Image (cartoon, rainbow, N blue to C red):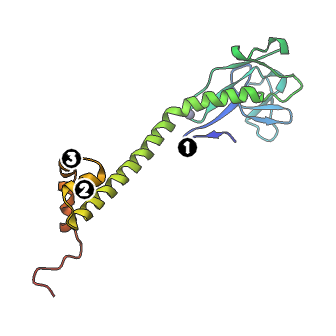
Amino acid sequence: MGWVSTDNEHEGWAACVAPDGRLSITSSGAGMLFRGLTGRYEPDRMRPDYEVVPDSEIVGWRGHCSCGWQGDRWERVASPTAADFNRRRDYISADDSAHASLRVEDAIHNEWNAHVAPSEALLGLEAAARDYNRAGRRLAKTVAAAKATGASWADIGRAVGISRQSAHERWADKAAPLHVEEPQRRPPDGH
Ligand SMILES: [Zn+2]
């Protein structure tokens, strides 16, 4: 289960990197599963088109997204003293599962967040524009209703916080159609 963007277009993970550069997010009891058979590793018994790279051979981690994006590589180093977070180097014991440490996973999550930030921002913009247009339509309807009761443009301008002339320029065209668009208008000669 990875990180999913609000629009569901992106799903990201902290993937393990094999010595040949392939990425995997799936582990079995024996190691990490990588799609494709190179002959250098044992095929997985359950999924024969995958091979098992032992945890100890995983060389690093990187962000991976369903859209194809990949983050920069985090290198797995051989000893705790060689670890250096600022240089993207982290140590994980050869006996452990090869998954990224929580700290590296968090850093990769942040990199992925930066990757989806533009589309998330545009989504926010679309939502804001929808709200803005909806509010604008409601305002225009309310103005038309006020006009229908006999309010002047000066009254309406004062209520909205703009000048009489601005109110007139903004809604004079829109206030009128309310009367002609009534769907159930009866013919002039009545019933
Ligand atoms: Zn993506």
Q: Earlier in the sequence, mark 2 or mark 1?
A: 1
Q: Residue furthest bottom?
A: 191
Q: Is residue 125 above or below residue 91?
A: below
The residue depicted at 86 percent of the width and 36 percent of the height is 29
Whether label 3 lies within 8 Å of ligand 1 gets the answer no
Task: For label 2, count other residues whose C-alpha is less than 10 Å away and answer few (under 14), some (14-19) or many (20+).
Answer: many
**Residue 106 percent coordinates (x, y):** 70, 30
Q: Quadrant of residue 53?
A: top right
Q: Which residue is mark 2?
A: 156
Q: Quadrant of residue 70?
A: top right
Q: Residue furthest right?
A: 95
As rendered, which of 166 and 189 lies closer to the eye? 166
As rendered, which of 128 and 41 lies closer to the eye? 128
Q: Which residue is mark 3?
A: 166
Task: Tell me the quarter of the image containing the C terminus.
Answer: bottom left
**Residue 80 percent coordinates (x, y):** 84, 15
Q: Is residue 41 above or below residue 123?
A: above
Q: Cβ–Cβ below 8 Å for labels 3 and 1?
A: no
Q: Which residue is mark 1?
A: 6
Q: Earlier in the sequence, mark 3 or mark 1?
A: 1
Q: Quadrant of ligand 1?
A: top right
Q: Tag 1, which secondary structure?
A: loop
Q: Is residue 42 left or right of residue 133?
A: right
The residue depicted at 39 percent of the width and 45 percent of the height is 129
Q: Is residue 8 left or right of residue 19?
A: left
Residue type highlighted by circle 3: Ser
